[in-house]
Image: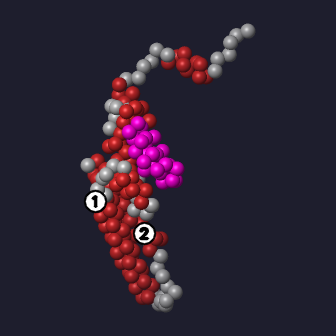
Amino acid sequence: MAEIKSTLDLMLEKTRHMTLSDEEKKELLLKEINGKIKGWIQKFRDRRLTAEEIRTELNRARQDYASAEVIKLFKKSLIRSIEPDGDNAPAFDLLERVLGEDTSRMSLLLDTFNREMEQEKKRIADQRGRQLSEQGISGSAVVPNHVKDGEWTTAFAGRLAVFTEKRTLIADS
């Protein structure tokens, strides 16, 4: 009786003479390292890893992946995980305690973004409040919803793009 081959067996048979180029190997290595880094960060956020355990993992990774700049990749990943509306305390904690990084630039960037968005929210709410008042709608229960306003959406997207660009510059420095 004929042997039935699995799809995997057929694929392995057809590709057994193929090899990865150096560029492909490097790309796979970076993907693997970045996956581990993201896992460490998430486990730290979930309180399943301590800062000391991450330091140990980083040292091990530096030995296992000698050709990669693991610390630099870790720093970039941490900084890029910082979002204006997120819980950024774990990222700042790791940057300071594990990497010894000065986080003042990133803190200033976050504070500036939040301050500008608060000012924008107040400006739009005041403007919409005046418009409603001109239409005869007023009172203490009237509170304009800035979030549903197209002007807010545009302003938020624009400032978020600037924030992301500056965050990337800090991550790459």
| Residue 68 drawn at (x, y percent) | 34, 35
In this rendering, the answer to whether 69 lies above or below 162 is: above
Find the magenta span and give its range. Answer: 33-60
Q: Is residue 116 magenta?
A: no
Marker disc for residue 7: none
- Give how far across and how far down residue 121 sits, in percent: 39, 74
Q: Can you say whether 11 is above or below 111 in the image?
A: above
Q: Is residue 142 left or right of residue 73?
A: right
Where 132 falls versus 150 (above or below)?
below
- Badge 2 is on which residue? 150
Residue under the image location 42 percent in, 60 percent down = 89
105 vs 73: above or below: below
Residue sitting at x 31%, y 58%: 103
Circle 2: residue type: Gly
Helix or strand or loop: what does disc 1 sit on?
A: helix
Q: Tell me where residue 13 appears, x and y as whole percent.
A: 54, 16
Asked if one can make out residue 162 in the rendered structure from this viewpoint, the answer is no
Q: Looking at the picture, how far across and down is residue 143, in whole percent?
A: 48, 82
